[in-house]
């Protein structure tokens, strides 16, 4: 085969100087992003993101259940897949949302702002964590097109909750995600081993 023939089949990529760009350009799936994150982040930070409680049975089980889902192609004229749907009355490009992750700036200096930018670009909703490391107003100011939801845990302090809800409404957060399953944090053994505590001591 001649080089010109090979070039029609294989697209040679121009070398990239920035290591970060190179790594991201070569990551095609979650497993590859995970491997890149493991190399880039300090151990305690990576384990907080990657780990689960105790023997991580639930974490593994969640993943297995997700893997057991299959997609059935529908039979009929091929018009191209249309993944558009509505969630809570608003059109979204995909039937999924970007879910809250507390303290996102632990993993990247831009943190929640970068996630909001990605959500706006992909036209899917983003649920900002109550333990966000960027203010809800900053996210709203910078990414007004992002369909914004807000996440919080129940608190017996009604004044605190009322103040939060007022800020949410003023900053255009249109749905609330209320945590009911984290009354106590799990025994996260990786974090214990690494001496990592979140929320901070
Ligand atoms: C580092 C980290 C922080 C998270 N923080 C929150 C949070 O503040 N509130 C919340 O409701 N869920 C939180 N979650 C759960 C995620 O929103 C999501 O439901 C969970 O990771 C499962 O989705 P996945 O399989 O795509 O990771 C967090 C998850 C991770 C990994």
Image (cartoon, grey):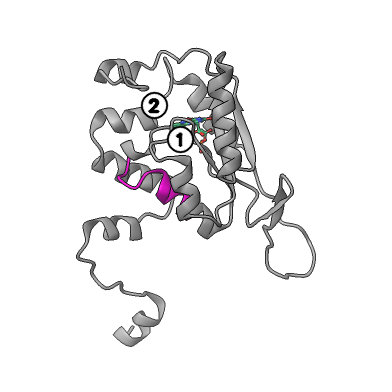
Q: Earlier in the sequence, mark 2 or mark 1?
A: 2
Q: Are marks 2 and 1 in contact (CB under 8 Å)?
A: no
**Quarter occupied by residue 23:** bottom left
**Quarter occupied by residue 12:** bottom left
Crowd rating for badge 2 (residues with CA inside 10 Å; few <14, some 14–19, many 20+): some
Give the residues drawn in magenta, as a range. 107-117
Whole-percent x and y of residue 166?
A: 59, 34
Q: Which residue is mark 1?
A: 101
**Disc 2 to disc 1, C-alpha distance:** 13 Å
What is the residue that sits farthest to the right in this orientation? 76
Please state which of residues 169 and 114 is positioned toward the viewer in this rendering.
169
Please state which of residues 63 and 104 is positioned toward the viewer in this rendering.
104
Q: Is residue 138 visible?
A: yes
Whole-percent x and y of residue 184?
A: 49, 12
Left or right position of 41 against 54: left
Mark 1 within 8 Å of ligand 1, using the beta carbon:
yes
Asked whether 109 falls inside the magenta stretch, the response is yes
Q: Which residue is mark 2?
A: 51
Whole-percent x and y of residue 170?
A: 58, 42
Q: Is residue 174 above or below residue 17?
A: above
Q: Nearer the viewer, mark 2 or mark 1?
A: 1
Residue at horizontal 34 percent and vertical 48 percent from the top = 110
């Amino acid at each position: 085969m001649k080089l010109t023939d090979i070039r029609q089949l294989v697209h040679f990529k121009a070398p990239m100087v920035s290591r970060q760009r190179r790594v991201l350009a070569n990551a095609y799936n979650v497993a590859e992003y995970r491997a890149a994150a493991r190399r880039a982040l300090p151990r305690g930070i990576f384990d907080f993101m990657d780990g689960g409680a105790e023997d991580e049975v639930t974490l593994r089980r969640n993943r297995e259940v997700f893997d057991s889902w299959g997609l059935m192609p529908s039979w009929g004229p091929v018009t191209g897949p249309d993944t558009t749907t509505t969630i809570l009355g608003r059109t979204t490009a995909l039937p999924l949302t970007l879910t809250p992750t507390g303290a996102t700036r632990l993993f990247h200096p831009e943190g929640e702002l970068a996630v909001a930018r990605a959500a706006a670009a992909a036209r899917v909703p983003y649920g900002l964590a109550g333990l966000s490391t960027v203010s809800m107003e900053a996210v709203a100011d910078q990414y007004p097109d992002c369909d914004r939801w807000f996440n919080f845990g129940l608190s017996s302090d009604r004044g605190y909750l009322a103040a939060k809800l007022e800020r949410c409404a003023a900053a255009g957060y249109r749905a609330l995600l209320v945590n009911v399953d984290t009354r106590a944090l799990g025994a996260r053994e990786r974090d214990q081993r690494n001496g990592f505590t979140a929320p901070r001591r």
